[in-house]
Image (cartoon, rainbow, N blue to C red):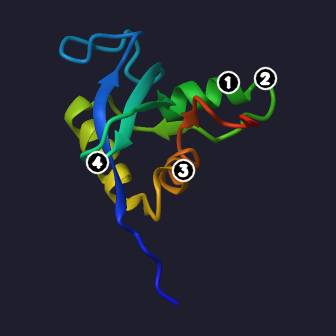
Amino acid sequence: MTTDASTRAEIRWLLTPDIDPETYVPDDPERFMFLVQMIAGPAGEPGEESFDFEVCSPGWLAKQARGGPVAGRHHVIVDRFDWPALVAYFDDLVARCTGADWSEVAGKLSRYGLWEFEDYRA
């Protein structure tokens, strides 16, 4: 059986409301976390939706886990802040998520980032 993977995602914007990625230097390079909002939509078509990721260091995650279990979903764990590497990661992520239609592609992306329509019921 073959799958029609004709729909692909493309990133419209990567937003970081917590930091300025051009100038950010973590106060503690061992412990940091910031939000990345990936605005993506079907390649070459109108429309876009938001997928949220918490980018964090292992030290930040360890500190959170001292208070009890931490769910790993929607986290991108990095050993150091490197904005170009993060952009490349998100580019690769959307390149790997294809499907028969946008709903399928968005569902795949939501395995990684918190989709604005996650758990939405019409």
Circle 2/circle 1 CB separation < 8 Å: yes
The residue under label 1 is 64
The residue under label 3 is 103
Q: Nearer the viewer, residue 42 or 28?
A: 42
Local SS, label 1: helix
Q: Choose the circle earlier in sequence order: 1 or 4.
A: 4
Q: Choose the circle earlier in sequence order: 3 or 2.
A: 2
| Residue 100 drawn at (x, y percent) | 46, 65
Q: Choose the circle earlier in sequence order: 4 or 3.
A: 4
Local SS, label 3: helix
Which of labels 3 and 2 is toward the front? 3
Q: Choose the circle earlier in sequence order: 2 or 4.
A: 4
Q: Report the residue at 55% width, 25% height from top.
A: 60
Mark pair 1, 3: CA separation:
33 Å
The quarter of the displayed image where residue 118 is located: top right
Q: Report the residue at 52% width, 90% height from top.
A: 1
Circle 3 Cα neighbour tier, 10 Å, few/some/many (<14 / 14–19 / ≥20)? few
The residue under label 2 is 67
Which residue type does callout 4 highlight?
Answer: Ala
The residue under label 4 is 43
Q: Is residue 7 left or right of residue 68?
A: left
Mark pair 3, 2: CA separation:
36 Å
Q: Residue furthest right?
A: 68
Quarter placement of the C terminus = top right
Circle 2 Cα neighbour tier, 10 Å, few/some/many (<14 / 14–19 / ≥20)? few
Is the residue 75 above or below the residue 19 in the image? below
Circle 2/circle 4 CB separation < 8 Å: no
Local SS, label 2: loop
